[in-house]
Every structure is written in C-alpha cells, then in structure tokens.
Amino acid sequence: MLELRGVTVRYGAVQALEDLSLRAEAGGITAILGANGAGKSSLMRAVSGIAPVVAGSVRLDGQDITSLPAPARAKLGIAHAMEGRRLFRQLTVEDNLKLAWSFGARRVALSASLAEVYDRFPILKEKARIPAGLLSGGQQQMVILSCTTIRSPRCLLLDEPSLGLAPIIVQQIYGFITDYAARSGITVVIAEQMAMLALKVSRHCLVLRRGRVVLQGPSDELRQGSDGKALAASYL
Amino acid sequence: MDDFFFSLLLAGVSVGAVYALIALGLNLTFWTTKTLNFGQGSLMMLCAMLTVWLSSQGIAVALAVLGSLVVVAALGMFIERWTVRPALKASSGSMGWVVSTLGFGIFLQGMAAKYFGSQAMAFPDVIFSAQDYVTLFGQFVSLQYLVVLAVAVALILALELFVRKTVWGQAVQAVSLDPELALVQGIPVRRLVLGSFMLSSVLAGVAGVLIAQIGGTVDPAFGFDLVLLGFVAAVLGGMGSSFGALAGGLVVGILSKLVGGYVSTAAEHGIAFALLMLALAVRPQGLFGRPEVSKA
C-alpha cells in the first residue's frame, strides 16, 4: 500500500503539488487523472524520490520513505516507468532488462525472468540485441514495462503508458498491465490522460488539477454517476 | 628503417600511451558526470613527487608508489565532493567545475612547491633503470618505454572489459546515458560518481609515475601541459571512448615526437593543439565517438 500525506512538491518558485494526500491499496489499480501540468508526474516523482518534497510524507506499506534517496526506494520495491518513454536508448533491449533485474529485488533468477518477458512479448526476443532506441514506440513501451516488472516490485508507478501509441497497441499494453496487477497483487498507480480508459481498468481514481486533488472515488462511480459532469469539468 | 625515425616513433608511442591513460582518466568522470577534472595534471605531479619523497624516507619504491596512489585517490574523492558537486548543484549545465577543478590543481601545485621546493627532483627507478634495453627489429629499445606501453594498454583493456562485461560497468554506462533514469532504477549514482573520480585520480597518478619514470625528474609544474595533451587525445579519439583514448593518445604522441624530431621541439605541443582544432572542425565526435542512436 502506498500512502501520501500532505505532500507538497516545489521546483524553485513553481509549486507542482500542494498538500496532496492519497491512499493506493495493494491488489488493484489506482488511476491519477488530470490535464497536462496538473501534477501527475510530480506525484510519481515524489514517490520514487526524484522530486523535491518540501512538506508531507510518503509511506510504502507503512514505512516512511520520505527521507530515502531514489536508489534506496527502488531497492525497497518502487518501480517507476517515467513519462516520455525513458529507457537507455543506446543499450540493447536485453541489456536494459538485465540492468533493471540486477538492481531489482532479484527474487527470480535472471534467465527465468528474461524467459518470462520474452514469453509475454515475443517480439522483444527477436529484438533482444538491438539498441532499445531503435524500436517502435509500442515495443519501447513493452521494454519499459518489462523493466519495471522484472524487478519484482512492491509498488508500480506508470506515467502515461498510452502516450503516443496506436489504439491497438494501447489495448495490448493495458491488457498486460491489468493482467500483471491482478496476478501480482501489488500496488499499481497509473497516470493517464485518457480518462475513460483509466476509469475502466482502475478500482480507485483521483483527479488532479493544479497540484491538488479535485475529485476522487471508486472508478465505476466516477464513470457512471453524476460525477461524470464533475470529471468533465475538472478538465476544462 | 631509419634509426632516427624508429626512435622517434617509439618515444611517440610511449608518451602517447601515457596521454591515453590521462585521456582515460578524463573519460571516466565524463561518463558519470559530463565533467572533466582539470586538476588531473597536479595529481600526476603530486603522485610522482610523493613517490620521490616517500622513497627518500627509506620506504621501498613499490610501497611508495602504492601509498602515493592511495593519497591521490583520496584527493579524487575530495575533488568530487568539494569542487565538482557544488559547481553542478549551483545550476545544472553550469561550467563552474572547469574553474574549480583547475583552481584546486593550481592550489596543489602551489602546496607542492612550498613543501617540496620548486626544484626538479630525480625520480627513482621503479621497475627498470634507464639503462635497461632490449633489442627489437635490430634497434635498442628502452625497457621503460615498453613497460609504459604495456601498463597503459592493460589498463585500457581492463576498463573496457569492465564497462562492457560487468553489471557495474553497465551501470556506469547507464549513468552516462540518463542519470535520472539510473536513479529510479536503483543504481547508486552517488557512489558511482565518487568511484569514478577516485579511479580517474588513480589513473592520473599512474600516468604521473610512468612519465616521471621516462623523463627521470619531477617538479611542481610537471603535469600541467600533460593533462592538456591528454585532453587533446580524449577529444581526438572521441570523448568517452576507451579505444578512442588509446588511438588519440598514440596519434598525439607520435605526431608531436615526429614534428619535434624533424622540425623543432618547440613545435611539439603546437602541433597537438593544431590537431585538436582540425579534429573539432572536421570530426567533432572524434575518431571513435559514438553518434546518437535514436528514432523519432
């Protein structure tokens, strides 16, 4: 379970998150919705330890990790797929996976972990020796997701995994995410701009606007109920 | 082969190997922080001077070298913590580290002049004396030259193997490609940066001892222009490439010795910097520089 209490993130004079609190339970997906610049990425960066948190606390399964540096948090089991399809573009697909595994929890042997990834995404086996930067957008996203799951994380943060991908690829990617979330039972938080998609896969949902939570609740209520209007309003 | 040409070539290869070592040291910190330690020259000098001083106190030469390398490695940590990190923290993309590392180098040079005197000191024979020769292609070749070359090549191969074949080497590459991504992937970036400065300083120390061994003497000013030549070698070979460092070092070494032998020794350094300008104009990524791999 991931818990934020009164977290404020500030970059110089710019306030990215203000007094934000959230609880993301394990065993389900929590969706973070919001327009560009609403603070979705800052929230995730505050959790993984690369954003300047000036107030509040971050807890993973009850343990306060607010003062831990990013590598220590990663070691505790926080896996963060950053926005903008970040991977080591000059390293091969397999080297990216190996590196992620090496600095992860190492609960499963490397060969078994790689086999699992290649079994799930056979195309990555074909491209294993190719620099990751040369893959298509969808394939890169598969590598990035696999780099997070190969670490055997306790908490998964996915920042706009659908960005810039063809609808059919988005479906495939989300199929993998929901499947993995259900199978592993860990805490999964997804930041997403495609509201309907995020509401469909998630159990709980938060809407951010200018660094604050403006709406939250169970996803199916937000999708069907009168909150639909409020949801639309928060994007305007 | 002409005797004179051959001896120049050999001297060039030998000093070129040392330039390669210096370039390799510069590469190391460039990998992890995109900064260069311009105080390297003073570390070379200090390591050689400390070796002379320690051995004059009756310590075995090998131990003296080892002790000096430890001191230099500690100074590498100091440089990272107190000259590079604050400069990078002040504002990302700032070039303050150029001034701060160079400044620390000048400080070390001044301290060395104060405590060891500014006179040149004779450097002890570490492995072979200047009188040891072997015959190669019918030529007398100083064993010292061969030792310098062998040490340089061995270190370069070891470093290249480390980077390509080990997890920690891959982690260093990851830090050089995207430090923030490396952080969230659990790579201890801080420790790697510190390690790179220590190892870079040790390489500078080894280079200093080797070149003092060839030259026979050290003084506080020693090392300052050497680090510039190492810089030329690094840029020429492609900043960040180990084999580039070796190739760049050899090109600079051989060319400057040939120019020194056939034209004028005064032109030795001039030609190296002419080479630098030519390289920057024609092939800025260097001989072995890797072009960006990306897909829009």
Image (cartoon, grey):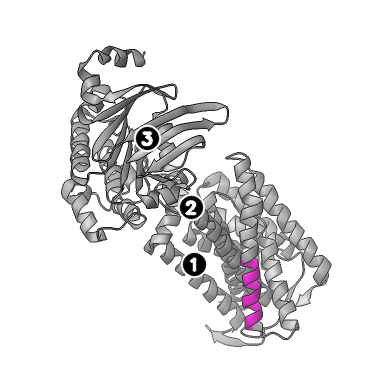
- Labels 2 and 1 within one chain: yes
The type of residue carrying mark 3 is Glu
Q: Which mark is residue A28?
A: none
- Residue behind mark 2: B189
Residue extending furthest toward the front: A62
Region rendered in magenta: B62-73
A137 or B182: nearer the viewer: B182
- The residue beneath circle 3 is A83
Q: Chain of mark 2?
A: B
Label 2 or label 1, whichever comes before in sequence order:
1
Quadrant of the snapshot with the C terminus of chain B: top left
**Helix, strand or loop under label 1:** helix
Q: Are marks 2 and 1 in contact (CB under 8 Å)?
A: no
Is the residue at mark 3 from the same chain as the one at mark 1? Answer: no
- Crowd tier of the residue under label 3, counting other residues whose Cα lies within 10 Å: few below 14, some 14–19, many 20 or above: some
Is B71 covered by the magenta stretch?
A: yes
The answer to whether A19 appears left or right of B223 in the picture is left
Question: Compared with residue B44, is residue A137 higher up or lower down, i.e. above or below?
Answer: above
Q: Nearer the viewer, mark 2 or mark 1?
A: 2
Q: Quadrant of residue A185?
A: top left
- Please state which of residues B224 and B106 is positioned toward the viewer in this rendering: B106
Q: Say which of marks 3 and 1 sits in front.
A: 3
Residue beneath disc 1: B156
**Left or right: residue B141 compared with residue B166:** right
Callout 2, which amino acid?
Answer: Val
- State the quadrant of the N terminus of chain B: bottom right
